[in-house]
Image (spheres, grey):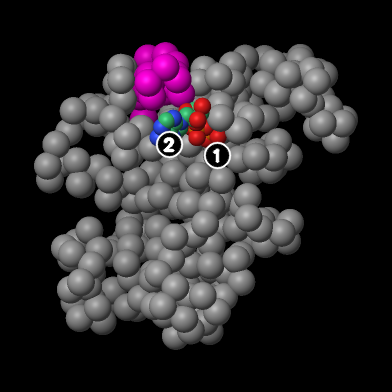
Amino acid sequence: MLQIQNLTKTFGATCAVRQVSLEIPEGQMVGIIGRSGAGKSTLLRLVNRLLEPSGGSIAFQGTTVTGLKGRELLAWRADCAMIFQQFNLVNRLDVLTNVLVGRINRHGPLSSLAKHFTAAERALAIAALDRLDLADQALQRADTLSGGQQQRVAIARAILQDPKVILADEPIASLDPRNASRVMEALSAINREEGLTVLCNLHTLDTARNYCDRIVGMASGEVVFDGRPESLTKAAVQRLYGAAGVEEEIAESVTSTSLPAFEPDRRSAGSRVALTA
Ligand code: ADP
């Protein structure tokens, strides 16, 4: 369980995240939606402590994450795999090495990484690539791959990290619809099969509806919607995007049915990938 309580982050006069409280059970796939500037990215960066909160707290499985220092902070960051809109691969390295970078937290500085991966780790990296249908590209330079393939390499890297949480910041914003679907399917499969908690910032409502167990809607740094995809009514969408800003396709795709309040997903988490190398 990830518990976020009254989390606040200000940048000068801007309050990017304001008094956000969320309880996210293990194994849930959460889509965070909202306009640009709503605070989605700041929220993810607060969770993995890339940013320090101005107030409030975060706890994971009973341990307070806010306040961790030194080795414990590094361990928490290693438990949170980040997936970025721009993939953040090392272009000049081959795909396999990029995936092995997911193990770096167990190896120390980047400069020494290439020599230190074990055969077992390489096998794990190949298996992760195979799972994402990319084993044939293992020895290609990362920058020879399409955007969709690069994002799937980033997901393979996240798998090698053996995280407890995946934080994906607009992972499909740069991709065409077909590649976007493949990337979302890959994230969804990891969520289901490994029981990993996934927090995913998304631009499009339909994607959040199709792939997420729960949708958190943010506006001006606050949570203004928290519920199952089916309960994201037209009125809720208008609160999120503003009546004038609701594109026709969004307005048409939402249901006006009123549904019961959200209850956390109770399904049991699957077993995590064994990474014993
Ligand atoms: P979103 O991810 O929903 O687009 P962000 O979390 O990036 O929103 O930004 C929320 C608000 O915080 C915006 O007003 C943005 O300009 C501001 N902000 C984000 N990061 C910084 C920063 N490092 N310095 C100053 N302001 C920032």
According to the picture, the residue beneath numbered tag 1 turns out to be 201
* Residue 196 seen in the figure: no
Judge whether 2 appears above or below 14 on screen.
below
Circle 2 sits in a helix, a strand or a loop, which is it? helix
For disc 1, does the CB lie below 8 Å from ligand 1? yes
Within 10 angstroms of label 2, few (less than 14), some, or many (20 or more) residues?
many
Q: Is residue 16 magenta?
A: yes
Residue 264: image tag? none
At label 1, which amino acid type do we have?
Asn
Quick one: label 1 or label 2, which is nearer the N terminus?
A: 2
Q: Is residue 227 magenta?
A: no
Q: Residue at x 82, y 31 (%)?
A: 247
Q: Residue at x 69, y 16 (%)?
A: 239
* Residue 251 seen in the figure: yes
**158 left or right, relative to 182:** left
Query: x, y percentage for residue 50?
Result: 31, 40
Circle 1 sits in a helix, a strand or a loop, which is it? strand
According to the picture, the residue beneath numbered tag 2 turns out to be 44
Query: x, y percentage for residue 148?
Result: 61, 65
* Residue 102: quarter of image: bottom left
For disc 2, does the CB lie below 8 Å from ligand 1? no
Query: x, y percentage for residue 47?
Result: 36, 34
Instruction: Find out whether the residues at labels 1 and 2 contact each other: C-beta distance under 8 Å.
Output: yes
Real-space Cα separation, disc 1 to disc 2, in angstroms? 8 Å
The image quadrant where one finds the C terminus is bottom left
- The rendered magenta stretch, by its main secondary structure, is classed as strand
Q: Residue at x 59, y 21 (%)?
A: 219
- Which residues are drawn in magenta? 1-23
Q: How many marks?
A: 2
Instruction: State the residue in front, 111 or 206.
Output: 111
Judge whether 65 appears above or below 204 on screen.
above
